[in-house]
Structure formats: structure tokens, C-alpha cells
Image (cartoon, helix red, strand yellow):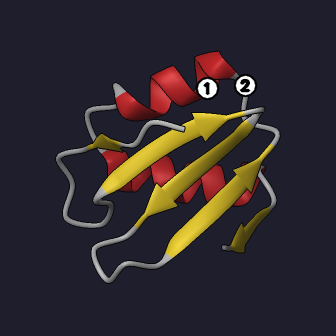
Amino acid sequence: MQWMSVSSSRVSAVAHEDKTMYIRFPDGATYAYDNVNKSEYQSFINSPSIGRELFRFQNLHPYRRV
């Protein structure tokens, strides 16, 4: 799995593997979002506001701390 740094005050890095998107926060906490396909991941990382996209993802995809 390859992590990608993003420009956001809320998120420090993201990764995608096997329909799971991983989000690492500035405090080091990492969460896994299930059932995220590759195109949703691409839309997330290319979003003009990662924070706004994160809010949307939290309402659409089950997630857990890892």
C-alpha cells in the first residue's frame, strides 16, 4: 500500500487497497473506510476540499480506527 500526502489541515495522508481507503490524520490516527472503489478514491484525493469530502465519506462508508 502506498500512502499519498495531501494538502489539508484535517488529513495528512491517504491510501487505497482492496476497496478500502485509509486516512491518516495529523495526530497519527488512521482510519479505514470500507467499500471505496478506485474512482471514489481518485475523486477524494482530487477534491478541492479534502475536509468536505471526508465529511461526505463518513456518511456514506462504514469506517473504523486501525
Disc 1 packing (10 Å; few <14; some 14–19; many ≥20): some
Disc 2 packing (10 Å; few <14; some 14–19; many ≥20): some
- At label 1, the amino acid type is Glu
Circles 2 and 1, Cβ within 8 Å, touching? The answer is yes
Report the residue marked by disc 2: 37
* Residue 59 vs residue 34, the one in the foreground: 34
Location of the N terminus by quadrant is top right
- At label 2, the amino acid type is Asn
Report the residue marked by disc 1: 40
Find the residue positioned furthest to the bottom.
27
Tag shown at residue 27? none
x and y, in percent, of residue 11 in the image: 33, 61
Find the residue positioned furthest to the front.
1
Residue shown at the point (26%, 33%) measured from the top left: 48
x and y, in percent, of residue 25 in the image: 37, 70
- Exactly how many numbered labels are in the figure? 2
27 sits left or right of 36 in the view: left
48 sits left or right of 62 in the view: left
Residue shown at the point (25%, 45%) measured from the top left: 5
Residue shown at the point (43%, 46%) measured from the top left: 14
Residue shown at the point (40%, 43%) measured from the top left: 3
Tell me if residue 46 comes above or below residue 6 in the rendering: above
Location of the C terminus by quadrant is bottom right
Question: Circle 2 — which element?
Answer: loop
x and y, in percent, of residue 13 in the image: 34, 52
Tell me if residue 45 comes above or below residue 31 in the rendering: above
63 sits left or right of 5 in the view: right
Q: How far apart are marks 2 and 1 (CA)?
A: 5 Å
Find the residue positioned furthest to the top.
39
